Amino acid sequence: MKNAFITGIVIGILSGLWLFVMHLTGYDLNKDQVAPIEYVSILIPVVGLYFGIKSYRDIDCGGKMGFLEALIQCFKILVLGGVIAVFACILYISYISAGNNLRDFSGRMFGALLIGLLSSLAISLILTTKSNKVD
């Protein structure tokens, strides 16, 4: 659980910081359009999940990990990271970009949820070392 906690906090903080960095560099996040630089934010959960699950497999599981075990660990990491990122989003909407833009951010949060689920499936498949035969 310690690995999931640390990795989730790192992903959540980096995702929240990304939101504020985008604002400070002058990108308008209030539009329905997505700036091409926003696609770089996909790397935060993908890279964080990869290194978090790889660390979990190598250190906690002794190099052997099943698919379901990896998937559960991914979900633990993503839940904690998502809670922190949503909290940062609420702070951003409340204090920096006060206005009627909740719909825009709910769309972005749904996109982040979808990216997180797809990347957790892919990373779990990539880093699985134990095969479970069904006879």
Image (cartoon, grey):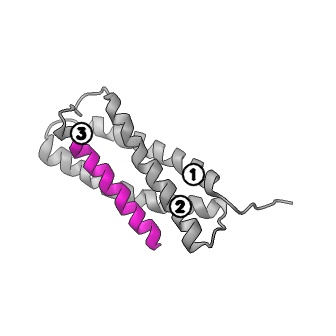
- 116 over 51 or under it: above or below: above
Q: CA distance from mark 2 to mark 3?
A: 28 Å
User: Which residue is located at x 43 percent, y 50 percent?
Assistant: 45
Residue lying at the far top in this picture: please name it: 33
Tell me if residue 117 is in the magenta stretch. Answer: no
Q: Which residue is mark 1?
A: 123
Q: CA distance from mark 3 to mark 1?
A: 27 Å
Instruction: Give coordinates of residue 90: x percent, y percent.
Output: 23, 50
Quadrant the C terminus occupies:
bottom right
- 91 over 97 or under it: above or below: below
Q: CA distance from mark 2 to mark 1?
A: 8 Å
Q: Which mark sits nearer the N-terminus, 2 or 1?
A: 2
- Which residues, given as a range, are shown in magenta? 1-21
Instruction: Give coordinates of residue 7: x percent, y percent.
Output: 41, 62
- The kind of secondary structure the magenta stretch mainly shows is helix
Rate crowding at label 2 as few (under 14), some (14 to 19) or many (20 or more) other CA atoms within 10 Å: many
Rate crowding at label 3 as few (under 14), some (14 to 19) or many (20 or more) other CA atoms within 10 Å: some
Q: Mark 1 belongs to which amino acid?
A: Ile
Q: Which residue is mark 3?
A: 22
Q: Nearer the viewer, residue 11 or 100?
A: 11
User: Which residue is located at x 52 percent, y 65 percent?
Assistant: 55
Q: Nearer the viewer, residue 102 or 121?
A: 121
Is the Cβ of the residue at disc 2 closer than 8 Å to that at disc 1? Answer: yes
Q: Which mark sits nearer the N-terminus, 3 or 1?
A: 3
Q: Mark 2 belongs to which amino acid?
A: Ile
Picture quarter containing residue 39? Answer: top left
Rate crowding at label 1 as few (under 14), some (14 to 19) or many (20 or more) other CA atoms within 10 Å: many
Q: Name the disc covering residue 18, or none.
A: none
Is the Cβ of the residue at disc 3 closer than 8 Å to that at disc 1? Answer: no
